Image (tube, rainbow, N blue to C red):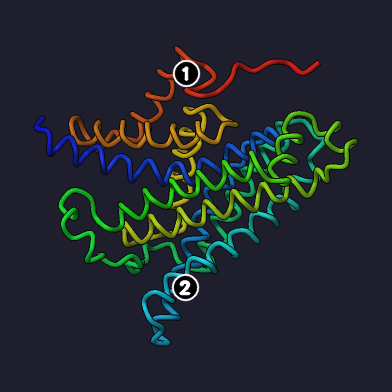
């Protein structure tokens, strides 16, 4: 395998891994706060992509300029996905807060199937073309043979979101409340933290990152359907577990490692089995490091 081909596979893997990372951030934040695997999170990603498609189509018909279309489509996708994430938490998870963990897990799977079928009935089962929202930048032309403008935007967006989330959690009042809630909900409530509000904010932030990922990957691939959230959500969940679920840097690292590993496997062995490879790779990593790449061994709370 020559170096240029390997570089192409590596950069393609980073792009794919960045999308996994954006979705995995939602999984890992929710798990870190309430120890719930939100299987409906992939559908929030899909809803964000559909919202951007509808918004971009309407704005293009109205003759709005390109930059405004991108800004408005992404903004509407984020707002709409956040509203869904907030509503899903209130309807499907909050009533089960004190129920056995299996009940919430089943509720998450049910909500995932409901959202899939809701979009299927409201839209169509066919793949729909998605407009290319990200133009080819003139200043990036000398490097376009190495990595395209769209891939560059995806990588940059993932890096910026990871930095902003890290800042949010480490240095803001909301972030401190999130960390307190993750450690002990009862004690956090006793010192004045509104636990319900913190959980809602966590779902909203996770939904926003998923919506951004949905718009970027749909613009990159050029088509969407109601089912895109399922496989992407499962892969992002694998990335979150791989990096150490509950860890934000771990979610990003897990996404990038999984994306690069998949890309190299597909380019050197077979693209037909890349989905199988993702899970085999996860099993192999967890055999040697059960808590994931950056996860901490689980300890029982006293």
Q: Which quadrant of the rendered structure holds the C terminus?
A: top right
Q: Secondary structure at mark 1?
A: helix
Name the residue located 12 percent from the left edge and 33 percent from the top edge: 3
**Residue where numbered disc 1 is placed:** 286
Is disc 2 placed on a helix, strand or loop? helix
Judging depth in this view, the residue of 125 and 279 nearest the camera is: 279
Identified at 68% across, 53% down, the residue is 88
Residue 163 in the image: state x and y as whole percent: 51, 44
**Residue furthest right as drawn:** 190
Q: Tell me the quarter of the picture where residue 67 sits.
A: bottom left
Which residue lies most toward the left here?
Answer: 2
Front-most of 239 and 148?
Answer: 148
Task: Check disc 2 and report the residue beneath it.
Answer: 54
Tell me where residue 252 appears, x and y as whole percent: 46, 37
Toward the bottom, the furthest residue is 62
Label 1 Cα neighbours within 10 Å, binned few <14 / some 14-19 / many ≥20:
some
Count of labels shown? 2
Determine the CA span between mark 1 and mark 2. 41 Å
Q: Look at the picture and state if 124 lies above or below 101.
A: below
């Amino acid at each position: 395998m020559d170096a240029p081909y390997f570089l192409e596979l590596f950069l393609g893997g980073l792009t794919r891994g960045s999308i996994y990372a954006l979705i995995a951030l939602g999984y890992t934040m929710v798990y870190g706060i309430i120890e719930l695997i939100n299987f409906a999170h992939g559908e929030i990603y899909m809803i964000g992509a559909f919202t951007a498609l509808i918004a971009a189509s309407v704005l293009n018909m109205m003759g709005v300029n390109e930059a405004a279309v991108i800004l408005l489509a992404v903004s509407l996708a984020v707002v709409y996905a956040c509203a869904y994430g907030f509503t899903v938490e209130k309807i499907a998870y909050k009533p089960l807060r004190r129920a056995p963990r299996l009940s919430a897990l089943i509720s998450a799977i049910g909500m995932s199937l409901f959202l899939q079928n809701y979009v299927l009935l409201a839209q169509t089962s066919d793949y729909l073309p998605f407009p290319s929202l990200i133009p080819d930048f003139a200043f990036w032309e000398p490097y376009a043979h190495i990595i395209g403008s769209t891939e560059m935007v995806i990588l940059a967006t993932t890096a910026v979101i990871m930095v902003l989330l890290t800042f949010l959690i480490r240095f803001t009042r909301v972030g401190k409340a999130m960390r307190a809630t993750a450690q002990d909900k009862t004690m956090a409530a006793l010192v004045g933290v509104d636990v319900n509000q913190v959980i809602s904010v966590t779902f909203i932030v996770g939904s926003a990152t998923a919506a951004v990922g949905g718009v970027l990957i749909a613009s990159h691939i050029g088509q969407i359907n109601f089912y895109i959230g399922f496989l992407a959500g499962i892969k992002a969940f694998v990335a979150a577990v791989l990096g150490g679920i509950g860890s934000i840097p771990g979610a990003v690292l897990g996404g990038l490692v999984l994306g690069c590993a998949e890309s190299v496997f597909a380019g050197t062995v077979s693209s037909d089995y890349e989905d199988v490879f993702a899970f085999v790779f996860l099993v192999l990593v967890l055999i040697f490091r059960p808590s994931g790449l950056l996860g901490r061994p689980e300890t029982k709370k006293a």
